[in-house]
Amino acid sequence: MDESLETRRSVLANPLASLDSTAQTGHGGDWQEEVFLKIKSMKDMYLGELNHMHQKITARLEQVRLPLCAIPKRFLGPPDL
């Protein structure tokens, strides 16, 4: 198995694992590659869905949001008793 693929799988399997790869692998310069792979894998997994959710929420907010000037003044003042 490719070492980078194995690293990626291990990072995905344990997302809370320490990013100090020196202690884990013995290679002092590999931590940057591990962080890059972790960020890239998270981007690949979640960015599309997050963008879709953002578009849906934004569209819904635009549907329900009324400019303040469009609300009749009788609704903005204190209630008549």
Image (tube, rainbow, N blue to C red):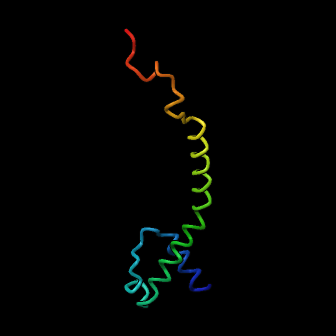
Residue drawn at the location 37% of the way across and 85% of the way down: 23
Residue 34, x across and y down, in percent: 49, 80
Q: How many marks?
A: 0
Q: Quadrant of the C terminus?
A: top left
In this view, the residue farthest toward the top is 81
Residue drawn at the location 57% of the way across and 35% of the way down: 64
Q: Quadrant of the N terminus?
A: bottom right
Query: Residue 58 vs residue 27: left or right?
Result: right
Residue drawn at the location 57% of the way across and 51% of the way down: 54
Query: Residue 23 vs residue 50: left or right?
Result: left
* Closer-to-camera residue (62/16): 62
Residue 44, x across and y down, in percent: 60, 67
* Closer-to-camera residue (44/23): 44
Query: Residue 35 vs residue 57: left or right?
Result: left
- In the image, is residue 12 above or below residue 74? below
Residue 21, x across and y down, in percent: 41, 83
- In the image, is residue 34 above or below residue 28? above
* Closer-to-camera residue (54/62): 62
Residue drawn at the location 43% of the way across and 91% of the way down: 27
- In the image, is residue 68 above or below residue 52? above
